[in-house]
Amino acid sequence: MLLHDTGLIYGRYLRQSLRSRFALLFGVLMPLLYLLFFGPLLTGLPLGGQGSSWQVLVPGLLLQLGLFGASFAGFSVIIENGQGVVERMRVTPVSRLALLLGRVLRDATVFAFQAVLLVLAAVVMGLRAPLPGVLIGFAFVALLTVSLASLSYALAMKVRTPQEFGPAVNALTMPSMLLSGLMLPMTLGPAWLDVLSHLMPFRYLVDAVRDAYVGSYATPHMLYGVVVALVLTALAVTVGTRVFRTAGA
Amino acid sequence: MAIISTAGLARTFATKRGPVEAVRGIDLTVREGEILGFLGPNGAGKTTTLRMLTTLLSPTGGAATVAGHDLATDPAGVRAACGYVAQSGGVDARITVREELVTQGRLYRLSRARAVERAGELAHDLDLTELLDRRCGALSGGQRRRLDIAMALTHRPEVLFLDEPTTGLDPGSRADLWDLVRRLRDEQGTTVFLTTHYLDEADALSDRLVVVDRGVVAAEGTPAALKLEYGGSLDASLQDTFLAVTGRSAALADAAPVAV
């Protein structure tokens, strides 16, 4: 039943995404601009890691794509709440978990697609990275999307108006981006900033993907990255499902 | 035979300014095959009650059974037995009528083929066949309402909850909707529980009325019985009766619009 319902919700929202092709491509614009206008600045700088500057930057841009895109996923639920669509579905026997999972899997699909576009563009710019590493990067983007989109939907069900939702998400995503070292490795900074950034879960994901992009798969970074990503996903989906079950209070 | 019965059904919302008792204790019974008009001033707790009876909101007190299923212990059974049309409806403006109807069938666990077939039946019954390939956003108010109701009838529910179904409709569409509600009850035996602010609608459509005020049932009975008891005579208008029940003075009523 869960599979059936999830597939149904997934299909409904994927068709919705496919209908707005403009939005589908527009999401990749911001990381693409970073790639074009920020990437070339780094090519000659000592970034402290292995490999080229592209192998440091592209993993960060991939997760930035997930971070900004998925965090705002909840906007669609705010619109649907206004139309009564969410409540109409909640009075049917459909699984509550499926109402969430179908949506977040759609988001993961969309962002994985955008991630592929971004990596292709990066290859043109000069990125060279092992294929398994690139695939691992996509897996992390998908997990990050699932967790952040779940939390975003949960928040959207709670705050209910775009005026509250937008600023709240902005206030959370900006420090997350800066503190997780998406643009430049945090190891370049002073010790206090490096320590602070370890409190930010996304830091571990970025480190893991950067390792993957230089072909190092069995590292402590990778282990921490996988553990943090899985724990984050489990927590976020639990919170999201709870909210979809009890929403309306 | 009671198809809905509630005892002390209550809901308190926790807000920043302390608890708000939206529904303080509703006791009511609805008989099978009855059209029940659920009336009350704005903020009396009508929608909150409806949302509890359809499992959208969990009660903070009391108990209820809907079509033999306990609200607290068997919400899935309640969902299978009832259909709900919210004030706002519940369709996506960008999707076609056909897709919404088929998806709704699938949400009620019909097979793909059966869901397509059911969408066709519902479209036929509610006069939507010509509109199947139109986007929901392109429908008129009356057509939208028929679609909302078609969606709620997908699984042939025993009880249909309608929250202000005719608000914003033109007189012709309203009359059509009344006919539809009567037909549902007469042909399928569906019990209809509807809220409305239009007293002429309540008078014309309902077998029995329940008036709520400040979160409790203030009066109930047939329209005629209520007029006699609270309005003073059978010729009293439901408007005056309503104002008498809810304690709003008649002097104020002169300034108030006909729909309270």
Image (cartoon, rainbow, N blue to C red):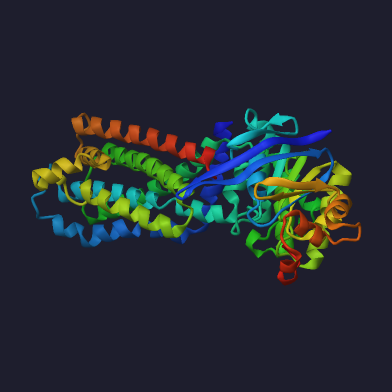
Q: Pick whichever, B196 or A153, lies toward us.
A: B196
| Residue B54 shows in the view | no
Is B84 left, or right, of B240 in this rendering? left
Percent x, y of residue A198 = 20, 39
Compared with A175, B108 (above or below) is: above
Identify which residue is drawn at 30% across, 37% down: A136
Asked whether the viewer can see residue B118, the reply is yes
> Which residue is more in the foreground, A205 or B167?
B167
Task: Please say if B203 is above or below A99.
Answer: below
Q: Position of residue A15 (x, y in %)?
A: 54, 51
* Residue B226 vs residue B123, the one in the foreground: B226
Q: Is B235 placed left or right of B256 in the picture?
A: right
Q: Between residue B251 and residue A50, name the one nearer to us.
A: B251
Q: Which residue occupies the extreme bottom position in the image?
A: B255
**x 54%, y 37%: residue:** A96
Q: Is residue B18 above or below residue B141?
A: above
- x%, y% of residue A43? 13, 55
Question: From this viewpoint, which residue is outermost toward the right?
Answer: B234
| Quadrant for the C terminus of chain B in the image | bottom right
How many numbered circles does the render carry?
0
In the rendered image, the quadrant that contains the N terminus of chain B is top right
Question: Residue A139's x, y, as percent?
Answer: 34, 38
Residue at horizontal 84 percent and vertical 54 percent from the top: B205
